[in-house]
Amino acid sequence: MFLFNNIFLKTLRDNRAGAIGWGIGLGLIMLIGVTQYDQLIGGAGAARAKSIEELTKAFQAFSFMLGEVTSLGTLGGFITTRFLGFGSMILALWVLVVGVGLIRGEEQQGSMEVLLSTPQSRSSVLTQKVLALLVAALVATALFGLGLWLGVIIISDSLPFDAQLLAMVNLLALLVFWGAVGLLVGQFTISRRKASGIAGGLLVAAYLLDNLFTGTPSLSGLAWLMPFHYYSVSKPLVPGRSMDWGAWLVLVALTLVLVALTALIFSRRDVGSAVSLFRSRAAEDPEKTGSAFLLGSVFGKALRDLIGPTIGWGVALGLYGVLIIATTNETIGAMRQLAQNAGWLAKLMGDLTTNEAYVSTGLIYLPVLLAIYSIIQVENWSSEEEEGLLEVLVSMPLARWKILVARYVAAAISTFVILVLAGALMLASAAMSDVTLNVERVFGGLLAVVPVALLVLALGLTIATWLSRPGYAVTAIIVIVAVMFLMDILATIFNFPDWVRNLSIFHLYGRPMVEGIQWGGMLGLVVATVLFAAASLVGLERRDIAK
């Protein structure tokens, strides 16, 4: 009961599973990545120089995802390029979702009214929740940094500890900034999911645009308009670079401005309402503000909740693919030559004799991103149960298994639409860029991700329905997915036995755009999904949901 003594501790308790899960998951990726550095950049003299040159060319081809490619001949440069760019965006996405839920989440479930009926001012409530967000982000950052520190110790590298600490301080400022963005966006919409979708879209767009502007000399001046730029200019791990405290202070100042603006809005609006930027007829007539669309059934409600995220993720992944396709004609020749002489790197890149192979290499993170989409749904389910919302559903004259099956079907439809939307944008871009692609291979490769996403969802919900505290399922599934992703990469590089490779869902997914769909692997994913889904149904039937 200690963590219920005040709003700060209660908020911290509610988000502890996410902080620990995301921190450990990304920390493991960092740990294993650091410990494999000597194998990736091995040898000495000419052999080492060649490895560095090959890796630099490969990373530069995907700089729109990784950001500035720094000196890969040093551990600090490799970590900065490989992990501190894309990894920061993934961690910021979780903090952003938490930020949205601090106020809007509690308003949506009705608990904010109860909270404000106590002798607590709105400013006090907001302050305590923001401080809890800061501590949660600090925990996740510390675990991420712990992975780096342990990796450096294991390989006995001389990467300075103060530089590692500064890198995490820089990351923490970025995370709290995006948490504040989520907090502010939540003031302008009634739905927590809609606010998360809008803020998440802003985050991804800001990250990609910063990389694009930074990598294009004629547009480099626009990079200063992107929040990620104030994070990326500081590179304390890279020899010859340092911490840019001016840029760091800009991030901190922007965060304080966002929190102050949120406090001003929150103190002046009605609880449960949202600020409208544009006056509408619906705002003039409160009775017309709601819509019963898709609210006639549990399945309809589950589907409606995913409309915004589906469109947002579909467009975002489509733009990700568009950027890859836009570089095809310019880069594929150099990448093919690199793959022929890249040693271990060639194993990861595979056969680049076709445009589909190049696109497949660029979309290496696609199944991981869809796995994250499923993890977010597991987190939503766990939050609904811990917040008492699931009790309302199970109290209705409706079989419990139908509630969970409705979620699975809605998730399957959502994932399918995301991939179709992304594929349509990619093929349209290919037509405009004069890049020839096999439509069947592209859509087959994209839709083959559906079983991966559904298996992650089924495994996460199985853990959530069988554990006494469903929130711990988020930590568990993040760690499992991170280990499987690393296992697939390392198994490819070091030729692990097939039975080890088959333990990874990403290996079973394969490279369908290049090799076609591996039906044996797909069957394994589908069978595992059905088994775990059945286990989750049993778990839901037997568990005591009452808090």
Image (spheres, rainbow, N blue to C red):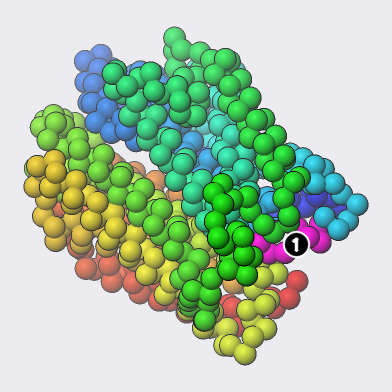
Q: Within 10 Å of the Cα at label 1, are there few (<14), some (14-19), or many (20+) other Cα atoms?
A: few
User: Magenta region, mostly helix, strand or loop?
Assistant: helix
The quarter of the image holding the N terminus is bottom right
- Residue 189: x and y in percent read 58, 54
Q: Residue 403, position in %: x, y? A: 54, 79
Using the image as rendered, state which of residue 165 and residue 135 is in the foreground: 135
Q: Residue at x 32, y 65 (%)?
A: 416
Tell me what residue is drawn at x 12 percent, y 47 percent.
431
- The magenta stretch is 107-115
Q: Residue at x 73, y 55 (%)?
A: 270
Secondary element at image label 1 = helix
Query: Relative to residue 152, is residue 464 drawn left or right?
Result: right
Quadrant containing the C terminus is: bottom right
- Residue nearer the viewer, 280 or 136: 280
User: Which residue is disc 1 drawn over?
Assistant: 111
Please tell me whether residue 210 is drawn above or below residue 492 in the rendered image: above
In the image, taking residue 476 as reference, residue 7 lies left or right, namely right
Residue 323 x/y as whole percent? 26, 39
Residue furthest out toward the top: 240
**Which amino acid type is shown beneath numbered disc 1?**
Ser
Whether residue 29 is visible, yes or no, is: no
Q: Quadrant of residue 334?
A: top left
Q: Is residue 273 left or right of residue 534?
A: right
Q: Is residue 108 left or right of residue 49?
A: right
* Residue drawn at x 52%, y 81% as measured from the top left: 296
Q: Does the magenta run of residues contain 108?
A: yes
Question: Which residue in the rendered view is the most extreme toward the right?
Answer: 119
Find residue 502 and report its image quarter. Answer: bottom left
Q: Is residue 256 magenta?
A: no
The location of residue 520, given as percent across then percent down, is 24, 68
Residue furthest to the bottom: 397
